Image (cartoon, rainbow, N blue to C red):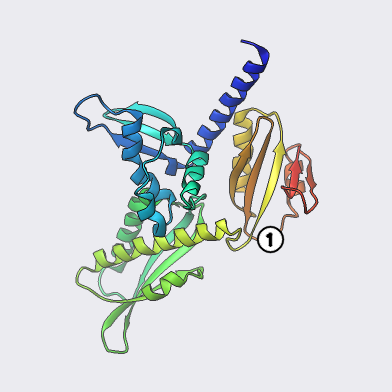
Amino acid sequence: MNKPLFIVMSFLSFLWNVQLAIAEGDTRFQVYVPDTQQEGGLTIQKAMRLALPTLWQRVVPTQSLEKASRLRGRTSLVLQMKRNGKGVNLVFNPVQVQTYLRQYHITMMVERAHWNLNVVLDGFTGASSALAADLMDYSDAISDALGIQLDSQGRKLELRFTQVIGTDGTVQIEADISPPFSIPCLTCQSRQPVQGDLSGQLQIWLNRILRDLRDVSNARLADGGNDGSSLYITIISDASLAAQISLEQLLQQQSEVVSVIPTMIQQESRQYRVVLREADDSWVSSWFASYGMTAVKQPPSSPSQWLIE
């Protein structure tokens, strides 16, 4: 193999490995498809089309789901297909998925919502604690379908359901979210009359609230917000793929950081969108210095605010 072709092939292999590592770190892009085909088994085309509804539920805002459901996809969206028992595991390429949806004017939710959820019930007679625990279990059960992550490392989120007496004397349930989110679509859902199956009613309501929070949080990201600010950084390095991923994970764990989103990947440079909790990047230089790297602030006209080497 001649040297230029070898360099190209090496870069394509590097790029594929980076994209696979990104997709494997975000379970929204991993879909298991049972093989129920009577003849011929699952081809990549069949598996991809069967997996798309699950993928769209995870990465497409609720208001765009109907439009996305009409899309047939293409096999280039799939990074990897592996047989697993009586089905196959598909790993989708986040970059290709985002590009594909953009062609149809659909905005992909680039970040998996990550919350430390707590559900509280107030003013209910009987086993309020048991019902709250059941709702927590239900939240865990639907988190994969919603494309969200719930664990103690996420942003604190408390949903409080309180039983109150309405102005007409009926028993009602009032929902409160803490910390407060400015979400107009929740206004009409802040209070409901108590219906027959209380557990089922709260589950449906909880599902809708989590979807709304997920959609609006990602809409803020798309606008460059999310209760803080975003900055773009470019890292120039010939480090191994494992070292790159390790650095990204360490940056993600930094207390000032909400999320780290790759936006451009090249052979020796990578650009990231770093979403911050506060509009303060004064820590960037010292943080990278602690890992033996130099961070230089760039002029306003530059595509990145920081260049790291």
The C terminus - image quarter: top right
Residue 292: x and y in percent read: 76, 36
The N terminus - image quarter: top right
The image quadrant of residue 225 is bottom right
Residue drawn at 63 percent across, 17 percent down: 5
Q: Is residue 73 above or below residue 117?
A: above
Residue 52 shows in the view: yes
Residue drawn at 67 percent across, 17 percent down: 4
The foreground one among 150 and 31 is: 31
Residue 255 shows in the view: no
Q: Is residue 173 above or below residue 268?
A: below
The foreground one among 111 and 132 is: 111
The image quadrant of residue 85 is top left
Q: Helix, strand or loop at disc 1?
A: loop
Residue 203: x and y in percent read: 30, 62
Q: Which residue is mark 1?
A: 279
Q: Is residue 61 above or below residue 18?
A: below
Q: Residue furthest bottom?
A: 168
Left or right: 252 in relation to 46: right
Left or right: 245 in relation to 132: right
Residue drawn at 52 percent across, 49 percent down: 110
Left or right: 29 in relation to 197: right
Count of numbered marks: 1
Residue 142: x and y in percent read: 34, 52
Residue 263: x and y in percent read: 61, 43
Q: At label 1, which amino acid type do we have?
A: Ala
Q: Is residue 108 above or below residue 8?
A: below
Q: How many C-alpha atoms fall within 10 Å of the one at disc 1: few (<14), some, or many (≥20)?
A: some
Left or right: 8 in relation to 45: right
The foreground one among 95 and 232 is: 95
